[in-house]
Image (cartoon, grey):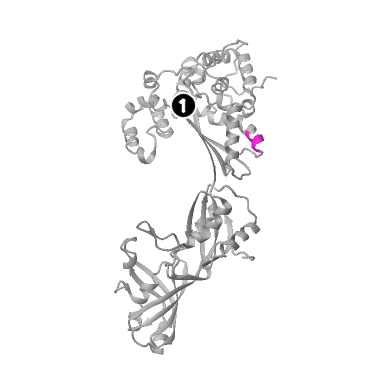
C-alpha cells in the first residue's frame, strides 16, 4: 500500500508539484530528498520503506517510471539511501551489542559532511530560480534535515532490534560519523570570499580540527550573494563516487556522578595520585582507593575526582568526612539500586586508610553544590603544636578569647611552585588551646575555608600575620594536623550509611 502524503507540501498545485519532482529527479535526487525539498515534514511519511516512497513520488510525477537514478543522491550523499537499509542498520545493532553498554533508551547523533550545506543551498537556489514565487522566501530551515529524516526512519527499526525506545533526549548515544573525501575541496571557494575567517581556522587546526566547519560555512552562506555562489559552485551531479562513508560508529553513555564523604586516617596518603618526575611519591591515593571499586562496577573509561577542598598528605580527615564527587565518563553499567551502591561503599571501606559514607548517585546539576560557598564555608581543625617556651594558662586563655580574627596570608613557600603569589585575607572564627606538657599543646580552631592552618601556627617566616607566635609572643610550630569537619551539607545524609 502506498504511503500517504501529509499534504503539507509548499505547493498544492499538482502540476507544479509534478514539475518540481521532475526537476529534482533529473538532478539525481533520491525519493526522500525529493520529498524534503517539496516541503514534506511529517515523520510518518518518512518511516515507510523506500519502495513505498518511490512509488508515491512516481505517482506525484503522473506515474512516470524510471525517473530515479541508481547513483548516490547528490543532496544527501547517499545517507538517506544506502545508510537507511538493513545491512547498515544491522551493523549499528551489532556495534551497540558488542559495546556491551547498559541503557534504557538511546539516541543517534549524526555528523554529516560540511559540503552538504553547499549542496542543499545549491538545490534550494535551483528551485528558487525555476519556481520563484514558491521558493523565494524559503530557507534551509524550512526543509526537513537529512539527520532528522534518517532518525525518523531508523529510530523505530533500531528500537525494535535493540529492545529500547529511541528518544531525542537520551543518556546513551550512538554516534555516526559520515565523511566525504571531497568535502573540503567543495568548500574551497568560500575561502576566497572570507579569507580571514578560514585562515584563522586553518592556523588553529591543531587545536580545533577542520578548517571548514558547519558554523563558519553556514555563516559565509548567509553573507554571500546568490550570484557569487552560482558563479563559483556548480549544481552537484550524481556519480558513483558521490557517496559518503561511515567508517566510525561509536557508542557512549553520558557521565554518571557518584558523591559521598570520605575520611582519611593515614598521614602518608595523598588525596590524588602523587606523581613527580615520572615516579610515584605514594603507593596509592584517596582518589584511587575510592575509584577502583567504582570502576569495577560501573566500568567507566575515565574519571574526574573533585572534593570540597583538600588536605595535605600528612593531614588526617576525621569527623563526618570531606564531601567529594566522582564524574565517571562513558560508564558501561548504569543501573544500580541503593543496595548496590551500599555494597560498593562496603567494598571501598575495606581499605585501612580511608572510609566513605553517604555514597550515592547524584544529578549533574547538583554537583555545583560541591563548590558553592567554597570560600565562605567553615572548617574546624585540631592540631598538635610545639612552643619554644612553656605557655602559661593566661596565654592559653587569651587565645580562647580571640573571635573573628582577620589574618593575611601570602601564598605559602611550600606551594609557591603551583600557586600564584598573592595575599589572601582569611578569618579565624574561634580557637582554644589545651596544654599537654611544658612544650606541647593541642589547638582547636574553626576558620574560613582556604585558610592555611600550618602557616597560621608557625607564621611561615612572617608571611602569615598575625599568627600564633605573634598572638602568644612565643615561637610555635605544628607537629600534626587533623581536619575535624567541613561544614557543607552535601551530599544528603543517608541513614543506612
**Image location (x, y in percent) of residue 96:** 58, 38
Residue interval drawn in magenta: 158-162
Q: Quadrant of the N terminus?
A: top right
**Image location (x, y in percent) of residue 288:** 49, 59
Q: Is residue 234 above or below residue 155?
A: above
From the image, give the main secondary structure of the stretch colored magenta. helix
- Viewed as shown, does residue 168 lie left or right of 381? right
Q: Is residue 163 above or below residue 337?
A: above
Residue at (55, 56) in percent of width and height: 294
Quick one: label 1, few (<14), some, or many (20+) residues within 10 Å? Answer: many
Residue furthest to the left: 461
Q: Quadrant of the C terminus?
A: bottom right
Residue furthest to the right: 1
The answer to whether residue 484 is magenta is no
Q: Is residue 230 above or below residue 497?
A: above
Q: Is residue 451 visible?
A: yes
Number of marks in picture: 1
The residue tagged with tag 1: helix, strand or loop? Answer: helix
Q: Nearer the viewer, residue 34 or 433?
A: 433
Q: Is residue 94 above or below residue 343?
A: above
**Image location (x, y in percent) of residue 140:** 49, 27
- Give the residue number, with chain letter if any, for mark 1: 116
Amino acid at each position: 500500500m502506498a504511503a500517504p502524503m501529509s499534504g503539507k507540501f509548499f505547493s498544492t498545485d499538482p502540476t507544479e508539484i509534478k514539475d518540481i519532482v521532475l526537476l529534482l529527479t533529473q538532478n539525481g535526487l533520491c525519493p526522500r530528498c525529493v520529498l524534503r525539498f517539496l516541503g514534506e515534514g511529517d515523520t510518518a511519511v518518512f518511516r515507510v520503506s523506500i519502495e513505498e516512497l518511490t512509488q508515491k513520488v512516481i505517482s506525484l510525477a503522473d506515474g512516470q517510471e524510471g525517473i530515479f537514478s541508481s547513483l548516490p543522491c547528490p543532496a544527501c550523499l547517499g545517507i538517506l539511501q544506502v545508510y537507511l537499509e538493513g545491512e547498515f542498520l544491522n551493523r549499528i545493532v551489532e556495534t551497540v551489542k558488542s559495546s556491551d553498554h547498559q541503557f534504557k533508551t538511546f539516541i543517534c547523533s549524526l555528523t554529516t559532511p560540511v559540503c552538504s550545506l553547499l549542496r542543499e543551498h545549491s538545490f534550494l537556489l535551483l528551485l528558487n530560480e525555476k519556481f520563484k514565487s514558491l521558493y523565494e522566501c524559503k530557507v534551509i530551515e524550512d526543509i526537513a534535515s537529512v539527520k532528522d529524516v534518517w532518525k525518523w526512519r531508523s529510530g523505530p527499526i533500531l528500537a525494535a532490534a535493540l529492545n529500547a525506545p529511541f528518544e531525542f533526549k537520551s543518556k546513551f548515544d550512538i554516534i555516526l560519523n559520515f565523511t566525504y573525501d571531497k568535502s573540503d575541496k567543495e568548500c574551497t571557494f568560500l575561502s576566497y570570499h572570507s579569507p580571514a575567517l578560514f585562515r584563522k581556522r586553518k592556523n588553529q587546526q591543531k587545536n580545533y580540527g577542520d578548517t571548514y566547519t558547519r558554523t563558519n560555512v553556514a555563516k559565509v552562506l548567509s553573507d554571500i550573494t546568490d550570484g557569487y555562489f552560482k558563479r563559483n559552485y556548480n549544481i552537484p551531479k550524481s556519480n558513483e563516487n558521490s557517496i559518503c562513508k561511515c567508517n566510525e560508529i561509536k557508542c557512549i553513555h553520558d557521565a554518571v556522578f557518584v558523591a559521598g564523604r570520605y575520611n582519611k586516617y593515614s598521614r602518608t596518603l595523598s588525596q590524588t595520585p602523587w606523581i613527580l618526575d615520572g615516579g610515584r611519591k605514594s603507593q596509592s591515593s584517596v582518589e584511587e582507593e575510592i575509584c577502583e571499586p567504582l570502576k569495577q562496577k560501573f566500568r567507566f573509561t575515565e574519571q574526574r575526582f573533585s572534593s570540597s577542598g583538600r588536605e595535605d598528605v600528612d593531614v588526617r580527615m576525621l569527623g563526618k568526612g570531606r564531601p567529594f564527587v566522582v564524574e565517571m565518563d562513558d560508564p558501561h553499567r548504569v543501573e544500580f539500586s541503593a543496595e548496590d551502591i551500599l555494597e560498593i561503599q562496603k567494598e571501598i571501606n575495606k581499605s585501612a586508610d580511608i572510609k566513605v559514607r553517604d555514597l550515592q548517585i547524584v544529578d549533574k546539576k547538583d554537583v555545583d553544590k560541591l563548590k558553592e560557598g567554597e570560600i565562605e564555608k567553615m572548617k574546624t581543625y585540631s592540631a598538635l603544636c610545639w612552643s619554644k617556651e612553656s605557655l602559661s594558662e593566661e596565654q592559653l586563655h587569651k587565645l580562647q578569647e580571640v573571635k573573628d580574627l582577620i589574618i593575611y596570608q601570602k601564598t605559602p613557600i611550600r606551594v609557591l611552585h603551583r600557586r600564584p603569589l598573592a595575599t589572601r585575607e582569611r578569618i579565624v572564627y574561634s580557637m582554644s588551646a589545651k596544654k599537654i606538657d611544658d612544650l606541647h599543646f593541642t589547638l582547636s580552631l574553626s576558620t574560613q575555608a582556604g585558610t592555611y592552618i600550618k602557616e597560621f601556627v608557625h607564621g611561615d617566616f612572617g608571611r602569615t600575620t598575625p599568627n600564633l607566635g605573634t598572638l602568644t609572643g612565643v615561637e610555635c610550630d605544628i607537629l600534626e594536623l587533623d581536619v575535624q569537619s567541613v561544614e557543607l551539607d552535601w551530599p544528603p545524609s543517608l541513614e543506612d550509611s
